[in-house]
Image (cartoon, rainbow, N blue to C red):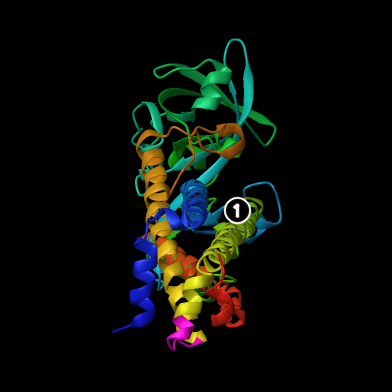
Amino acid sequence: MNLPLFIAKRIYSDNSDKYKVSRPAIRIATIGVAIGLAVMIVTVSVVLGFKHTIRDKVIGFGSHIQVMNFLTMQSTDPYPICIDDSVMRAIGSIDGIRHVERYALAQGILKTDNDFMGILFKGIGQEYDTGFLHKNLTGGKMPQFSDSKGTQNMLVSKMVADKLKLKVGDKVFAYFIFNDNVRARRFNITGIYETNMTQFDQNLCFIDLYTAVKLNGWSDNQCTGAELSVKDFDRLEETAQNVVDKVNRTADRNGDTFTSLTIYEAYPQIFSWLELLDINVWIILALMICVAGFTMISGLLIIILERTQMIGILKAIGAGNSTVRRTFLWFAVFIVGKGLIWGNIIGVGLVALQNYTGFISLDPSTYYVSKAPMEFNPLLVILLNISTLVVSIFVLIVPSYLISHIHPAKSMRYE
C-alpha cells in the first residue's frame, strides 16, 4: 500500500472543525488553479482562432503562393505574363500544389450620379475557387465568371456598396485609362461580399478574367499572374521552394520572366502583427502559472503549519521526512486536480459559449472580425493541464522541505 497516498486521501477528506483554518486555504488554492487554467484555455483559443481566421481571410484574397511577372514585383503597375493551359498544367504538377487559378488586375474608377471612387478590379475565370467569396457573400448571388467572354457582372464589397449607395441589381459605370484613352464599361451588381478586411474591402471588386484582360489591352492567355493553393499549409515553405526551383527565372513565350512569392511575403505586415500575439500568449501563460503556483505554495504552508502535530506523530512512529513530504505533495495533487477539473469546465464552457452565441463582439474596423473567434484545440488543452499540474507540484518541492525542521517532541505539544 502507498502510505503517503493513503494518508493524503484521509487528510483531503477530513472536514472536521479542528482544521477549519486550512479549509479556506484549500479553497483559495483550488480557485487559483481553476482560474489560471481557465484563463489559459480561453487565451490560447482566442489567439488560435484570431490568427487562423485572419490568415484564412488573407489567403482567400491571395491564395498561398502567387506567380507573376518579375516586373510586377518592381512596380505598382500590373505587367502581364503569359500563362496558357500548358503552363497551368506544369505549375499544377509541382509537388505540393493542389490548385492553380489565373487572375488579372485592372485599375479603374467606379462612378455613380453622386459619387465616385478608385477601385482595383480583379478578373477571375471559371477555374477560380470562389469558396471564400461564397462564405462571405452578404447579398445577391455569386456571378458566373468567365475567361472566354465578358458577362459584365460584378461582385463588390459591402464597404464599396455603402459608400456609393449601390445595391444588388444596380448598374454602375466604370472608367479605365489606357494609353491616354478612357474606356467605359457598365457593370451589373450581382453580389455583395463582406470580409471586414478593410484594406481589401475598401478597394477590391471582382469581374470576369476576360473583361480585365481586354481592359488592359492584353492578348489571350496573358494575365497578371496565377494563384496557387497548397495541399498542406504546414509545408508552405517547402512547396514554395519547389515552385522557385521549377518556375522562377524561367520565361514565357514572350520573353517575360516568371517570379513567385508566398502569402507571407505578399502581406508581411499582417503576419508580423499576428506573430506578435504569440508573445502576449506566453506572457499570459507565465502569469497564470505563477498565480496558480503562489496560491498552492501559500495553501501548502498553511496546511503544514496546521498539521504540525500530525507530522510530529508520524515522525514519532517511524515515518521519515521523505514519507511525510510525499504525503503533502500527494495532498497538493488532489488540490491541483480539483482545480484543473473546474478550470477545464469554465474554460471550455466559455469557448463553447462564444462559438455558439458570439456574445463577445469586436469592432471589425480594428480587429477584422465582428466577434471574438475561438478555436478549441484538445491537444493544447491537454498540454496546458499537464504543464499546470507539473509546474504546480514542482514549485511545492522546496516548501515541503519545511517538514524536515519539525521535531516530534516539540510538535506534539504544538497547538
Of residues 170 and 329, the one drawn nearer to the viewer in this rendering: 329
Q: Quadrant for the C terminus, please.
A: bottom right
388 w.r.t. 150: above or below = below
Residue 328 among magenta residues: no
Q: Quadrant for the N terminus, please.
A: bottom left
- Seen at 46% across and 73% down, the residue is 310
Magenta residues (range) = 314-320
Q: Amino acid at mark 1?
A: Leu
- Seen at 48% across and 41% down, the residue is 123
Of residues 229 and 293, the one drawn nearer to the viewer in this rendering: 293
- Seen at 38% across and 63% down, the residue is 12
- x and y percent of residue 268 in the render? 64, 55
Residue 143 in sight from this viewpoint: yes
397 w.r.t. 171: above or below = below
- x and y percent of residue 267 in the render? 62, 53
Please identify the quarter of the rendering in which residue 7 is found: bottom left
- Seen at 34% across and 37% down, the residue is 356
Of residues 153 and 196, the one drawn nearer to the viewer in this rendering: 196
127 w.r.t. 282: above or below = above
- x and y percent of residue 336 in the render? 44, 63
- x and y percent of residue 156 in the render? 48, 29
Q: Which residue is mark 1?
A: 274
- Asked which secondary structure carries label 1, the reply is helix
Farthest residue, direction top = 113
Of residues 254 and 20, the one drawn nearer to the viewer in this rendering: 20
